[in-house]
């Protein structure tokens, strides 16, 4: 920096200090002037008549009212900022429950270290006279394959008398072993046979492959897909893992397999979509997905929408399923298009893009009590609000009833809700209105109460229909795997990548809802789908395969 530059910066600094000093003098002067005017007003009060005094009092009350309003506004702003800061801190550092889990994990690690150290110090090979003090072991799972090793004595005759040895019984013990994941090459050999009397050549047809002329077998494809979309391991990391076993699979090759597999599975996903939209009640939600914008070197924010059909909590035996859809933005036209053939109850949050769906009555809105409770929870965690704590407690009583009737038939749930939950809801509504009257309109607690009251009809619709849930947790659970994947992937590579993700999330999520192992399910499907008739694709749906013997679980 040159000398002129340093002098110029010093001059600016000095000018700033002088300006601050001038402002301070003006502030002091203003205070003195107000005090002088106040003394003058007090001195002049004795000369005013009754009417003038009343007018002065009214004017002063007006001024005090304005000042009080400003003070309340500042207090509300302070409380709001505290709430925002607390919420951001939880986003950054995790909730208290998450902190407790981390503490437990640390204690478990410490316990593991102490037990390992103790084992190193005291371990001896057990003998028949040495007490082991080991905890009771659970039996090893029956479904695991058994490899039997029989150990015969070295003697072939009695060492005492030379007599013949006969079997008296046997001691059996089991040891659990792990076989590392490995590759193998399946070589298909098709001998050519020729007729000894003519020129006819006979050869078996080539077995079909999931991907025509593709290198990957169904098991490998299933593993790549599940690793990426269920275990959240990006393809470049999978490539590195495979390289450690001596198998070089470029990321681009894996990408080709993922794209081809999603195309192969598309008819099955479409069948899942039709099954989901045929329901009379759906859970819906969406989540942001960063996507690379082509040619910009930046990411744009797209959305993944989820629609869940799951009526098991109401005692229904219809197979549960989830369908994901991708869109480049969050415009309301997307759920409108997704649900163009749906009619019934839509359980969702208060997103404005859903509101136009409820016009005309074809779709009825059922709001989520978990969102209401979450707002009061944030307030209570930020400032320990007694009002928020009471709201949480009152809503908790409603959830207690729901836990008791989960899995019961819809008519039973309806009867219990009418008998027990209706009065609690009415009391909560009165309490909300009474509490709101004593709060500043701008306070966060008032905002949370108005959020609930403005959605009251949609929030209480579950009281009149035993098939409706109290909240939208089914959709939020379906989106958790997307959130974990987003944390690892950072962004999707393109809009086509987002559509592929929606395809695979739909199948993997539906397989999980039906109690299947996603990888075993995909392997089973990929072994067959290339040759499977399209008009019988429903046979490969997770709930139809779930009825088969338990090899897919």
Image: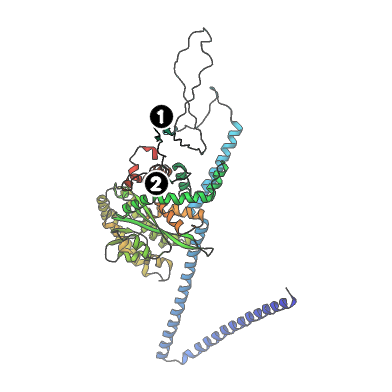
Q: Quadrant of residue 23?
A: bottom right
Q: Position of residue 230 (x, y in %)?
A: 45, 48
In this orientation, which residue lies closer to the viewer: 320 or 184? 184
Horizontally, residue 532 falls left or right of residue 483, namely: left
In this orientation, which residue lies closer to the viewer: 138 or 23? 138
- Residue lying at the far top of the rendered structure: 161
Q: Position of residue 58 (x, y in %)?
A: 41, 85
Question: Which mark, by number, is residue 242?
Answer: none
Q: Position of residue 317 (x, y in %)?
A: 29, 46
In this orientation, which residue lies closer to the viewer: 26 or 56? 26
Quick one: quadrant of the C terminus? Answer: top left
Q: Nearer the viewer, mark 2 or mark 1?
A: 1
Mark 2 element type:
helix
Q: Position of residue 495 (x, y in %)?
A: 45, 59
Q: Quadrant of residue 29?
A: bottom right
Alpha carbons under labels 2 and 1: distance apart: 56 Å
Sequence order check, earlier mark of 2 and 1:
1
Graded by Cα atoms within 10 Å as few (under 14), some (14 to 19) or many (20 or more), the crowding at tag 2 reads: some
Mark 1 element type:
loop
Residue 114 seen in this snapshot: yes
**Residue corresponding to mark 2:** 512
Q: Residue 87, relative to residue 63: is it above or below?
A: above
Q: How is the image coloured?
A: rainbow
Residue 553 seen in this snapshot: no
- Residue lying at the far front of the rendered structure: 198
Q: Residue 164, relative to residue 362: is it above or below?
A: above
**Residue corresponding to mark 1:** 196
């Amino acid at each position: 920096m040159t000398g002129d530059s340093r002098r110029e910066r010093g001059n600016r600094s000095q000018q700033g200090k002088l300006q601050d000093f001038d402002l301070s003098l003006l502030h002091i002067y203003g205070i003195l002037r107000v005090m002088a005017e106040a003394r003058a007003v007090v001195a002049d009060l004795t000369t005013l008549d009754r009417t003038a005094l009343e007018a002065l009092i009214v004017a002063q009350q007006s001024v005090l009212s304005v000042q009080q309003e400003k003070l309340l506004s500042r207090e509300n702003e302070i409380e709001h900022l505290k709430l925002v800061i607390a919420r951001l801190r939880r986003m950054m550092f995790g909730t208290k429950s998450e902190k407790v889990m981390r503490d437990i994990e640390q204690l478990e690690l410490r316990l593991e270290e102490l037990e390992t150290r103790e084992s190193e110090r005291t371990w001896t090979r057990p003998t028949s006279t040495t007490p082991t003090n080991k905890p009771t072991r659970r039996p090893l799972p029956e479904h695991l394959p058994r490899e039997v090793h029989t150990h015969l004595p070295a003697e072939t005759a009695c060492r005492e008398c030379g007599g013949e040895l006969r079997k008296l019984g046997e001691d059996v013990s089991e040891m659990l072993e792990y076989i590392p994941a490995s590759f193998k090459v399946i070589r298909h050999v098709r001998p050519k046979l020729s007729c000894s009397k003519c020129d006819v050549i006979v050869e078996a047809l080539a077995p079909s492959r999931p991907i025509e002329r593709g290198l990957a077998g169904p098991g490998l494809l299933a593993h790549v897909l599940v690793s990426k979309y269920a275990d959240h391991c990006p393809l470049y990391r999978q490539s590195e893992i495979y390289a450690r076993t001596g198998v070089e699979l470029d990321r681009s090759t894996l990408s080709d397999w993922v794209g081809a597999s999603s195309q192969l599975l598309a008819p099955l996903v479409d069948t899942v979509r039709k099954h989901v939209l045929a329901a009379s009640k759906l859970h819906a939600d969406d989540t942001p997905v960063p996507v690379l914008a082509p040619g910009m070197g930046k990411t744009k924010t797209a959305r993944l929408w989820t629609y869940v059909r799951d009526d098991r909590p109401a005692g229904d035996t219809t197979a549960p399923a989830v369908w994901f859809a991708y869109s480049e933005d969050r415009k309301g036209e997307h759920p409108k298009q997704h649900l163009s053939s749906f009619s019934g109850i839509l359980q969702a949050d208060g997103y404005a893009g859903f509101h136009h769906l409820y016009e005309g009555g074809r779709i009825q809105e059922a709001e989520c009590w978990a969102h209401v409770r979450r707002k009061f929870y944030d307030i209570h965690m930020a400032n320990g609000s007694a009002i928020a704590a009471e709201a949480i407690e009152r809503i908790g009583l409603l959830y207690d009833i729901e836990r008791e009737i989960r899995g019961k038939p819809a008519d039973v749930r309806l009867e219990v809700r009418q008998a027990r939950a209706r009065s609690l809801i009415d009391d909560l509504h009165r309490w909300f209105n009474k509490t709101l009257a004593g709060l500043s309109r701008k306070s966060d607690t008032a905002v949370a109460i108005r959020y609930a009251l403005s959605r009251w009809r949609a929030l209480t619709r579950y009281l009149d229909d035993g098939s409706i849930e109290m909240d939208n947790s089914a959709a939020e659970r379906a989106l958790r795997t997307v959130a974990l994947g987003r944390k690892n992937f950072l962004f999707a590579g393109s809009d086509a990548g987002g559509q592929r993700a929606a395809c695979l999330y739909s199948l993997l999520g539906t397989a999980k809802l039906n109690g299947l192992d996603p990888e075993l399910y995909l392997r089973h499907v990929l072994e067959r789908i290339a040759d499977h008739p399209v008009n019988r694709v429903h046979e490969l749906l997770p709930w139809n395969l779930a009825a088969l013997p338990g090899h897919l679980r």
